Image: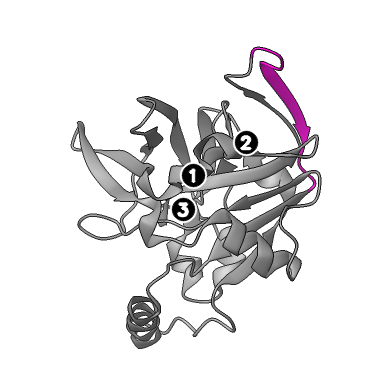
């Protein structure tokens, strides 16, 4: 999937990247006790225990999109903000993406639920090396529109999640970087007030030291489920 990113690098202000491998890193929190508690909650709802923690879901790379308008089937899907790390020209970059997921299908298969929805990604990125030293201070947030009002849906620092280096090493069996053309989402924080669908989703990665943000918004059109 060919996508472009704007950067802060004057020498290379635009990246044209061919992402051929897309990984969704699930169960990416650092607190194993909290992860186990959440697994038990999901088991009570009929959602199977993951086979490993963290777990790396492969999703078709053509599911990546930078469009502001996307289509979903049925009304049971929702977005979640995640950092998105990818390799371009031997350099690791970070952006943000939404692991938009069909929650109804999730009870049947987490892997199928992730494949069923497109994955919106921002159109700008930073070099990972610029923020790696203070990665835990970065903040991810998202907002949804409810009753015509913008509502904070997610917010938290990346200190609660595994670092990209840790997740990359788990996926590559010890390598320190992703292969060229490989992109990975790196986990999310909890939804304020619980997971729920919304037709408008805005996400942000905020850098408090440099007072800058990566942002992206998208609107979903719901397609009718027919039998």
- Give the number of the disc on residue 133: 1
Judged from the image, the secondary structure of the residue bearing numbered disc 2 is: strand
Residues at marks 1 and 3 touching, judged by CB atoms closer than 8 Å: no
Foreground mark, 2 or 3? 2
Residue 180: image quadrant is top right
Element at badge 1?
helix
Query: Is residue 155 found left or right of 80 in the rendered image?
Result: left
- Circle 3 residues within 10 Å: few <14, some 14–19, many ≥20: some
Do the residues bearing badges 2 and 3 touch, measured as CB atoms within 8 Å?
A: no
Disc sitting over residue 74 in the figure = 3
Report the Cα–Cα distance between label 1 and label 2: 29 Å
Q: Where is residue 3 in the image (x, y as percent from the top left)?
A: 71, 30
Q: Looking at the image, which residue is at 34% across and 41% down? A: 142
Residue sitting at the far top = 10
Residue 14 part of the magenta-drawn span: yes
Please report whichever mark, 1 or 3, sits nearer to the chain's N-terminal start: 3
Give the magenta-colored segment's residue range: 10-20
Q: Distance between the residues labelled 2 and 3?
A: 19 Å
Viewer-side residue, 42 vs 10:
10
Asked if one can make out residue 191 in the rendered structure from this viewpoint, the answer is yes
Q: Horizontal and vertical percent for residue 35?
A: 39, 77
């Amino acid at each position: 999937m060919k996508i472009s990113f704007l950067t802060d690098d004057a020498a290379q202000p635009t990246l044209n990247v061919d992402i051929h491998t897309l990984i969704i890193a699930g169960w990416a929190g650092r607190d194993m006790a909290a992860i186990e508690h959440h697994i038990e909650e999901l088991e009570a709802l009929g959602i199977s225990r993951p086979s490993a923690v963290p777990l790396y879901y492969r999703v078709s790379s053509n599911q990546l999109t930078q469009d502001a308008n996307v289509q979903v089937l049925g009304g049971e899907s929702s977005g979640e903000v995640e950092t998105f790390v990818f390799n371009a020209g031997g350099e690791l970059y970070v952006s943000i993406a939404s692991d938009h997921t069909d929650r109804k299908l999730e009870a049947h298969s987490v892997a199928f639920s992730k494949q069923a929805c497109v994955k919106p990604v921002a159109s700008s990125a930073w070099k990972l090396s610029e923020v790696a030293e203070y990665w835990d201070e970065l903040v991810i947030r998202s907002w949804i529109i409810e009753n015509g009002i913008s509502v904070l849906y997610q917010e938290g620092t990346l200190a609660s999640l595994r670092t990209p280096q840790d997740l990359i090493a788990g996926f590559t069996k010890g390598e320190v970087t992703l292969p060229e053309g490989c992109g990975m989402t790196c986990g999310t924080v909890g939804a304020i007030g619980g997971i729920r669908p919304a037709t408008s989703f805005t996400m942000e990665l905020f850098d408090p030291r440099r007072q800058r943000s990566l942002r992206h918004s998208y609107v979903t059109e719901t397609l009718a489920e027919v039998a």
